[in-house]
Amino acid sequence: MVGLGCTNSGSSTLNDLYFFRADLQNFTTSSETESKVSSLLSDAGVDVSNSNLSSIMDKASDQLNLADFYTVGLWGYCDGNVTSSNKYDTSSCSKPKAAFYFNPFEVWGLQSTGVESQLPDGIDKALSTYKSVSKWMFIAYIIAFIATIVELVVGLFAICSRWGSCITSLIAGVAFFFIAAASATSTALFAVLTPMFNEELGSYGIKGSMGKNMLATTWLAVAFSLGASLFWVISSCCCSGRSPYNHKKDTSGGITAEKAPYTYEPLGPQGRSTSPYGPYSHDTSYPPPPPTHGNANAYEPFRHA
């Protein structure tokens, strides 16, 4: 679910799964930005009213093709506009890319403007850190996903033996480690990046925020992965794949046959039955009465199962 976020502009559910959102809808209406530009124009001898200045900045924003907001996911980003009812309507998403990181200058088409060199030191360092850490975060999520798939497949063999449970427990531990590491990395990364983003660019009307749905999803995955790991460990310690029947080898070398129920057995030193059906007959009819003068081969009472 984490990997599906920001991959389909037509799905409102997937559009709500993002790590970070940059809100630019108030970019041209920032009073501090207008005052700075107005001051620069006044120093140059140009008298521009606030209404004209807003119009000029709106045109500049249109030329840059800036959207009202941008959301950042694991594989790419999405953009869109804010409706009159203050609803974020996603219009398009980028093509999924491995080890993706959001480069605002590339997305906004500012590479050739020289803006990067004019950035404050804080935001420049934050973007560099984000670029490096995002690659590790992407790799951790991919390893966690692959390990979980392997855990499901190998877990089928855990039914057959205790060794299968042990191997599955090891793989489950690897999956849990990387899911927890990826979730902790993404949470810490954007928790640090968001306030720095707002501090440096807030005066320009740009606001950043973290995605609560994405954080809930990734930490829910950690909880399920931990539960799976504990389950496999318990199953390898307490459960055995051996058959519940006793298959001990007969030390005498012969085969021991279990006596059938509902039969009569002779008693006495001769150890043989006078029944025409044999001592292990399944015939349940009563035999002829024993002789009155005594017989060592008398029959035992009816033996119940």
Image: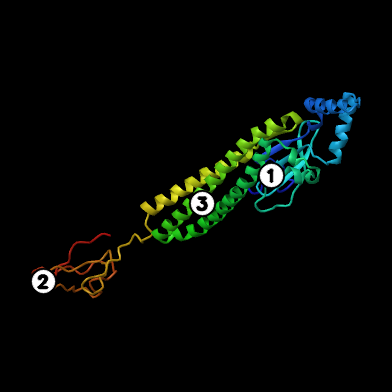
Q: Which residue is mark 3?
A: 175
Q: Is residue 184 above or below residue 149?
A: above
> Is residue 188 toward the left or the right of residue 96 in the image?
left
Identified by mark 1, the residue type is Leu
Q: Is residue 22 above or below residue 225?
A: above
Residue bearing the label numbered 1: 14
**Which residue in the protein does label 2 denote?**
269
Image location (x, y in percent) of residue 6: 70, 45
Q: Residue furthest front?
A: 44
Residue at disc 3, secondary structure = helix
Which numbered disc, 3 or 2, marks the residue that appears first in the sequence? Answer: 3
Is residue 235 at all visible to an observer of this figure?
A: yes
Rounded to the nearest angstrom, the CA distance separating label 3 from label 2 is 69 Å
Front residue of 182 and 112: 112
Tell me which residue sits at (37%, 52%) in the image: 237
Q: Residue at x 79, y 32 (%)?
A: 27
Which residue is at the front of the view, 23 or 41?
41
Q: Percent from the top left, x then y, of residue 7?
A: 70, 48
Give whichever of 195, 249 is nearer the camera.
195
Identity of the amino acid at label 3? Ala
- Structure colour scheme: rainbow
In the image, residue 303 lies at what x, y percent?
23, 61
The residue at 24%/70% (across/down) is 250
